[in-house]
């Protein structure tokens, strides 16, 4: 009794009885569906493979770009390290120059102080020279006066001696 009937049981549903002629039409529909499904699956597989190839190409391009960027980064890193070395070198030189500037500033202050002291001392020397010149002039006048007085005295002495020898009074 069940030989030419196939039963299909759907849970919580009624049993559907399919007869042989109906069964063959199902198989025909199913075989048509499977052929169509296989074709669609093959097309989908081809599309997936194409997309996979596209994705692989994109991945290769990305890897190439990544490698380029990596090389650029390495180059930039080397340049940065070089610049850091220069910066450190310049910092050391700058510190040395600052020390030299401080030393030069100390020397400048000392030179200014020495120049100021020298100027004061030169002013004192000039004043002393003027004083000495005045004293020299005064001494020369005194010498001249004393010389004149001495000459007068000698003249008077000579006149007095001549008078004494002559017996006359001056």
Image: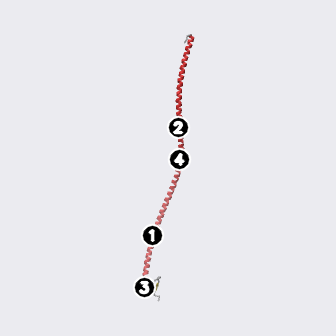
Q: Are marks 1 and 4 in contact (CB under 8 Å)?
A: no
Q: Are marks 2 and 4 in contact (CB under 8 Å)?
A: no
Number of callouts in the render?
4
Element class at badge 3: helix
Q: CA distance from mark 2 to mark 4?
A: 26 Å
Q: Are marks 1 and 3 in contact (CB under 8 Å)?
A: no
- Which residue is under mark 3? 22
Q: Are marks 2 and 3 in contact (CB under 8 Å)?
A: no
Specify the quadrant of the image occupied by residue 157.
top right
Q: Earlier in the sequence, mark 2 or mark 3?
A: 3
- x, y (%) of residue 11? 47, 82
Q: Nearer the viewer, mark 1 or mark 3?
A: 3
Q: Earlier in the sequence, mark 1 or mark 4?
A: 1
Q: CA distance from mark 1 to mark 4?
A: 67 Å
Q: Nearer the viewer, mark 2 or mark 3?
A: 2
Circle number at residue 116 = 2
Identity of the residue drawn at 45% across and 70% down: 51
Identity of the residue drawn at 53% across and 25% down: 138
Q: Nearer the viewer, mark 1 or mark 4?
A: 4
Check disc 1: other Cα within 10 Å, few if <14, some if 14-19, many if 20+.
few
- x, y (%) of residue 149? 54, 19
- Which residue is under mark 1? 51
């Amino acid at each position: 009794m069940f030989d030419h009937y196939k039963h299909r049981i759907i849970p919580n549903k009624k049993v559907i009885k399919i007869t042989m002629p109906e069964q063959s039409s199902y198989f025909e529909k199913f075989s048509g569906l499977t052929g169509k499904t296989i074709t669609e699956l093959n097309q989908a597989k081809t599309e997936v493979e194409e997309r996979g190839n596209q994705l692989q190409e994109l991945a290769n391009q990305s890897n190439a770009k990544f490698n380029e960027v990596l090389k650029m980064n390495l180059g930039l890193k080397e340049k940065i390290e070089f610049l850091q070395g220069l910066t450190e070198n310049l910092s050391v030189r700058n510190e040395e120059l600052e020390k030299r500037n401080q030393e030069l500033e100390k020397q400048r202050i000392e030179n200014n102080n020495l120049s100021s002291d020298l100027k004061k001392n030169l002013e004192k020397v000039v004043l002393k020279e003027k004083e000495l010149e005045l004293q020299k002039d005064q001494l020369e006048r005194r010498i001249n006066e004393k010389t004149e007085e001495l000459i007068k005295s000698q003249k008077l002495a000579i006149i007095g001696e001549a008078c004494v020898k002559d017996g006359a009074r001056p």
